[in-house]
Amino acid sequence: MLKFGGSPVIYDLDPYTDSSVQMHPLGALAVTDDGRKFRYAKAVASTVAGDCYSSAGQDSQFQSMAVNAIEPIGETEIGVTNGTTTVAASDFVEGYLGISSSTGIGQGGKILSHGTGTSGATIAYKIDRPLATALATTSKVTVIKNPYDDVIIQAVTPVASTAGIAPCIIATSYYGWIQTGGPAFALWDASVSAVDTLGVSPSTTTAGAVRVAAAGSEIIGRSMQVVPVSAYVAPVFLQID
């Protein structure tokens, strides 16, 4: 059952610590007393303070997978035929499932658990809400990882949207906070001669850096200070959240 109660925003946090044990749901929102925003994430590799990170790339083999059998109204466990990429334990836990086409299109939910399997295996995904419309064998299912699960350094050719800026080191496979809103310090790929009016985007030349936004680029905030030379860390006002 999808729940909106509890504490959706965390206020009593230290965003400069990491842990080998997961302490919060992935993507949990935290806000400091001055309004800066952070999201709880898991790192693939040790993060670098000031670098820009993205969500993990989504595998096309998990798009529009076939439903194995008719699934009735009220069902929360949906069996699908896996693509060619092996699914290991917890790959998609805290991620999302959606009905991408045919009967039941548009429904979806957060993934609570799932099985494992190789190419063509039947894998059951349990979601947090019951189906409101029954599924047919013509229905197709897409599953995606949580956008804050296994965040990676933002590549010069992005594989996913920006997750945030790392405020500190998060060790390999550890959990911690990445910043998504408010004043932050980010690595720049070039000098910047103006502030405030310039949008900021991930760099297209230096992995993990940011740049002045170009046409068609993802805007994650705005500049806050003149940057004298490249490879400097300087303040940006993040607007991801």
Image (cartoon, grey):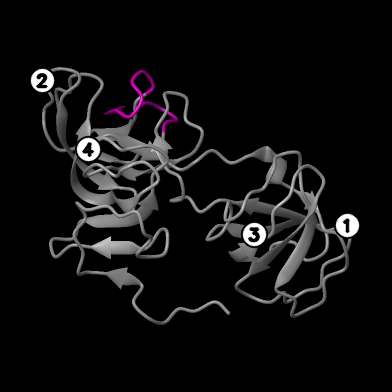
Please name which of the two marks, 2 or 1, marks the residue nearer to the observer: 1
Cα distance, mark 1 to mark 3?
Answer: 16 Å
Among numbered discs 2 and 1, the one appearing first in the sequence: 1
The residue at the point 14 percent across, 22 percent down is 193
State which region is magenta.
204-217
Residue appearing at x 26%, y 45% in the figure? 238
User: Which amino acid does the dot numbered 1 rest on?
Assistant: Thr
Quarter where residue 19 is shown: bottom left
Q: Which residue is mark 2?
A: 228
- The quadrant in which the C terminus is found is bottom left
The amino acid on which the numbered mark 3 sits, given as a three-letter code, is: Leu
Instruction: Kindly identify the amino acid type of the residue bearing the numbered disc 4.
Output: Ala
Q: Is residue 148 above or below residue 24?
A: above
Instruction: Specify the amino acid type for callout 2.
Output: Pro
**Residue 222 percent coordinates (x, y):** 24, 39
Query: Residue at label 3?
Result: 97
Between marks 2 and 3 in the image, the one whose residue lies nearer the viewer: 3
Numbered disc 1: secondary structure: loop
The CA span between labels 2 and 1 is 58 Å
Query: Could you tell me which residue is drawn at 19 percent across and 69 percent down?
Result: 12
Q: Position of residue 3 (x, y in %)?
A: 49, 79
**Quick one: SS at disc 3?**
strand
User: Which residue is the site of mark 4?
Assistant: 49
Instruction: Report x, y in % for residue 212.
Output: 28, 27
